[in-house]
Image (cartoon, helix red, strand yellow):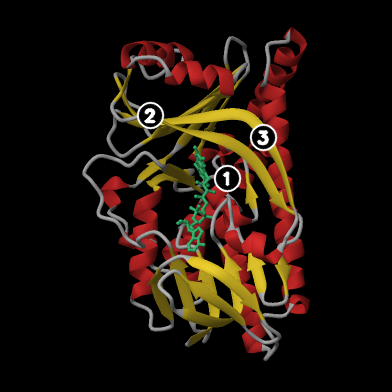
Amino acid sequence: MDTVDIAIAGGGMVGLSLAAALHDSGLSVAVISDQPFSREMPPEPALRVSAINGANYSTLSDLGVWQRMPQERVSAYHTMSVWDKDSFGKIHFSKEDLPAPQLGHIIENQLLTNALADTVAQQSHVKLIETRIQKVLSGQRETMLMQENDQVLACRLLVGADGANSFVRRQAQFPLTFKDYGHTAIVATVRTSVPHEQCARQVFTPDGPLALLPLSEPDLVSIVWSQTNEVASSLTGLNDEAFNHALSATSDGVLGVLTVESERHSFPLTMRYARQWAKNGMVIIGDAAHTIHPLAGQGANLGMRDAFALAETLKICVQDDKDFASLENLRAFERARKADAMAVVAAMDGFKTLFAGNHPLKKFVRGAGLVMTDAIPAIKRQWLAQAMGW
Ligand SMILES: Cc1cc2nc3c(=O)[nH]c(=O)nc-3n(C[C@H](O)[C@H](O)[C@H](O)COP(=O)(O)OP(=O)(O)OC[C@H]3O[C@@H](n4cnc5c(N)ncnc54)[C@H](O)[C@@H]3O)c2cc1C
């Protein structure tokens, strides 16, 4: 039987970020994933992309992860444009508003996962194990993980970074609050007839937002089109020509004629929030602890913040010779991260509700809100700084 200090369940962006951030902790780490850690990438962009904010970009660069991504496939955006469909409400952000070198980057999730896996594979403190955790047995001093490959791994602390349907969260019996957003997100890669000029755009329609995220080719964007389940299901049923037509019309023609170049995938959207994140020997982070609406591109960013904050907590425990697996020493981490996650969950709910529907008064309020925010530099800077994770 193998023994490590920290076992991380889940080799997604969040679990691997934690492993990378523990490089100087003196702790031995195993990451267990039921998916391959690294995947060969086809030449065309993958469907799942994320907007990574400035704070996480800096940390990933400091860890030497960012540099391992093929830079020709990473797309920095310098401006952001958000508007309310069929209303006067709009707001435009620019890197000069802060100022900052860029407002964020659009990356393919798998490319970042590959770069994280490459980074930790070089580090002697980490073992990467491709198998599924099937059973968890908690003891006084250790937790045993029974794996699908018939091996048993013992650890002092089990970290659940195993996604929205977290097995670890269920084993720990952490209570969960959840709500069906009633929205489905359609994602696809789309060719534009007008260049995107490194601008991330989002239009709010009464049935939900459409994001047009600039990829590294000047006329290619990734769309995240979140609509009520009924509208999304009728959009999914359209042939490519009719879908392209609906897409171009919804985007108000800002990028000209839009043509889908990939398959379309749909994701039902659910808010989840674990009311407990830690107990003796176990803690959860990332989508295992919270899932939110993608309208502000904050889910993975929030999860990475959990990972980097947990790494700091564990390192301090090691330095101070404290038990890093005890609830007593994980409590401050849990409290701080729950508060951050709760604030983001509430903000996403607020945005979704405010921008839903066509009531003239509501349209006036959101139009006035956007225009006023656009006109007041101090408020605009504060919004931007928050979106960038500063
Ligand atoms: C349409 C859409 C658009 C989004 N856009 C953005 C964006 O622009 N910016 C942003 O910040 N976020 C975005 N998000 C959110 C983001 O994708 C997620 O928050 C993020 O991927 C979560 O990462 P994770 O590592 O916590 O979980 P996951 O990526 O789900 O990884 C968990 C891993 O654990 C593995 N696993 C599960 N159970 C076990 C087990 N028992 N044993 C071993 N392994 C196991 C899984 O196979 C998986 O590989 C978006 C989400 C959606 C749906």
User: Relative to 91, is 197 on the left or the right?
Assistant: left
Disc 3 and disc 1 in contact, CB within 8 angstroms: no
Where is mark 1, residue-wise? 298
**Disc 3 vs disc 1: which is toward the camera?**
3
Disc 3 and disc 2 in contact, CB within 8 angstroms: no
Q: Quadrant of residue 365?
A: top right
Please name the amino acid that badge 1 sits on. Gln
For disc 1, does the CB lie below 8 Å from ligand 1?
yes
What residue is shown at x 62% (from left), y 16% (from top)?
A: 206
What residue is shown at x 71% (from left), y 85% (from top)?
A: 140
Where is mark 3, residue-wise? 180
Please name the amino acid that badge 2 sits on. Arg
What residue is shown at x 39% (from left), y 14% (from top)?
A: 238
- Tag 3's secondary structure? strand
Q: Which mark is residue 264?
A: 2
Please name the amino acid that badge 3 sits on. Asp
What residue is shown at x 65% (from left), y 50% (from top)?
A: 290
For the residues marked 1 and 2, what is the alpha-carbon distance in whole angstroms?
22 Å
Q: Nearer the N terminus, badge 1 or badge 2? A: 2
Vertically, is 126 above or below 333?
below
